[in-house]
Amino acid sequence: MKYQVLLYYYYTDIEAPEEFAAEHLELCTDMNLKGRILVATEGINGTVSGTVADTERYKEYMENHPLFEGITFKIDESEDHAFKKMHVRPRPELVNLSLDEDIDPRELTGEYLEPSEFMKEMQDDNTVLLDARNTYEYDVGHFRGAIRPEVETFRDLPEWVADNRDMLEGKRILTYCTGGIRCEKFSGWLKREGFDDVGQLHGGIASYSKDPVAKGQNWDGMMYVFDERITVPVNQVEHTVVGRDHFDGTPCERYTNCADPDCNAQILASEENEAKHLGGCSIECTKSPKNRYIIENELPAEAVEAQIQKLEAEYYAK
């Protein structure tokens, strides 16, 4: 059977998110969907997977729901489900900027730019292209020339902007994110902070990658996604690898989590380097008594100790 992945969001008023989430979980389960959906008083944000028939049935349901009139979906083909389970969870807000005074994108947001417009404007000399995602998302793929804010979470962006205001002042600021939802709030916040000339990629990278005019051009690498696929291609014309292996700096687009559960850092690493370092992102993590890689692969203690000694010798030789 053919499968699809639906990515969507919609800002609307949901009076009882907890009740809505419980009912929506039952609906999605009945439709054989798997995925992750967040519900808040300000709206809904989700990614679900299922057969083409099941996802189209869900899509039709949402499009005809009185709360979501005009909702749009980004659709990817898939060989199977992109999730293991179905979760629908109530949240205080759909995306967390940790603002004292929140932004309502229905009242204040940056100028929407369709993919072809965005492609043209990002090449203007007076334009600053600002990635609104986290560093690990940027590192595996981004628009050519985009600024990489040193942020590990979305809520860190306002502080980064405050510390780097000089590079943004007097410029045309273009922002982008995966599906568009983060830029809805972030671009509105930028305008409230006094940056008047702010545009956002309408529909995010997910829409840009499918646009028949843009064809994903000026994008290098892969797009990070929050499901079992981890990354998906964007540029339909040429593919350039920008990710670099955590251990040796060679081109790499394979993400894995550090085997130490107390660390769990997401790193780019080849299967060979992951095996060499026993799943740890550092010697300290490799030596962790909770190392999942060692436990799951049932590696003999003698072999583990010998490999750690080799790694330490390499480390101190540098």
Image (cartoon, rainbow, N blue to C red):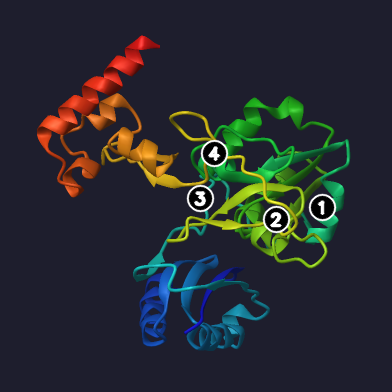
Give the residue drawn at x 56%, y 32%.
Answer: 150
What secondary structure is marked by label 4? helix
In the rendered view, does 128 fall on the left or right side of 267?
right
Residue 46, image x, y percentages: 50, 68
Residue bearing the label numbered 4: 135
Give the residue drawn at x 33%, y 11%.
Answer: 316
Give the residue drawn at x 20%, y 47%.
Answer: 297
State the residue lying farthest toward the top.
Answer: 317
* Earlier-in-chain disc, 2 versus 4: 4
Marking on residue 96: 3
How far is the residue under mark 3 from the one under mark 4? 16 Å
Q: Residues within 10 Å of mark 4 (few under 14, many from 20)?
A: some
In the rendered view, does 214 fall on the left or right side of 243?
right
How far is the residue under mark 4 from the one under mark 1? 22 Å
Q: Residues within 10 Å of mark 3 (few under 14, many from 20)?
A: some
* Earlier-in-chain disc, 4 versus 1: 1
* Earlier-in-chain disc, 3 versus 2: 3
Residue bearing the label numbered 2: 235
Residue 249 seen in render: yes
How far is the residue under mark 3 from the one under mark 2? 29 Å
How far is the residue under mark 2 from the one under mark 4? 20 Å
* Earlier-in-chain disc, 3 versus 4: 3
- Identified by mark 1, the residue type is Met
What secondary structure is marked by label 1? helix
Q: Nearer the viewer, mark 2 or mark 1?
A: 2
Residue bearing the label numbered 1: 119
Does residue 178 sit above or below 3 in this rendering? above
Q: Nearer the viewer, mark 3 or mark 1?
A: 1
